[in-house]
Image (cartoon, grey):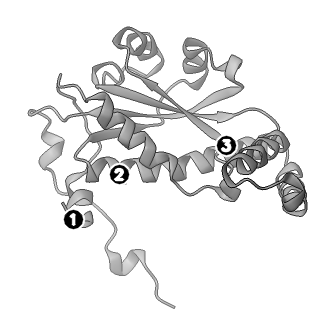
Amino acid sequence: MSLMDALNWRYAVRSFSEQQLEDAQVQQLLEATSLSASAYGLQPYRIFAVSSKSLRDKLLPHSYGQNKVSDCSHLLVFTVSTKPVTELVDDYFQQLGSVRQETLEQHKGYAEHMKSALGGMTAQAQLQWAHEQAYIALGTLLTSAAMLRIDTCPMTGIERQGFDEVLGLARFAQTTSFVCALGYRHPDDQAANKAKVRVPLSELVEWQ
């Protein structure tokens, strides 16, 4: 399926069928999402893949009655780091050294620049920045899922604190950003056949 065909096929699923995704499919989708762009390459977010139906049922009361949280095949909970950004920079360069066999000394100036640029923000601004990076990854997830013919529904209408408590995110120094349900559309989901409503390209894009 071509990219445009996949994007036209994709929509925010309103109702999921009982058909389950295979673990290999979810793994491939997660690998694709991990390759998403991210400021400085830091990826200040994590993804909790909830396959347990009983756990999804516990999250439902914190989802404003959106049954998709429970009915989907897998629920991906995107979380963002609550650690100081400077710690994320240190973690990144440790990983970089391991992957590229380069020393921290080789990147000392760049590391200091990153810590200065990001560390100068307030704690709230750092958290907002982390949420923005997670949304970039969501775009990669939705497109990749469409190419793989996996249905999705991203959701921000959730009680983040409730998700944090159910998933015990404090021990990971993480807090909930948003969720995305995965699975297959229910054959009776009428939203699947509705035309997309989008701003015309002539209005959306201004050539300069």
Q: Disc 3 to disc 2, how far (Cα)?
A: 20 Å
* Along the line of sight, the residue nearer the viewer: 91 or 84: 91
Q: Disc 2 to disc 1, how far (Cα)?
A: 12 Å
SS label for mark 3: loop
Q: Which residue is mark 3?
A: 44
Residue for point 71% across, 46% down: 98
User: Which label sits on residue 74?
Assistant: none
Q: Which residue is mark 2?
A: 144
Residue for point 39% across, 27% down: 75
In the rendered image, the vertical position of residue 106 relative to residue 87, given as above or below: below
Residue type at tag 2: Ser
Residue type at tag 1: Ser
Q: Position of residue 140 (x, y in %)?
A: 44, 53
SS label for mark 2: helix
User: Which label sits on residue 2?
Assistant: 1
Q: Disc 1 to disc 3, how far (Cα)?
A: 31 Å
Q: Earlier in the sequence, mark 1 or mark 3?
A: 1
Q: Position of residue 20 (x, y in %)?
A: 22, 25
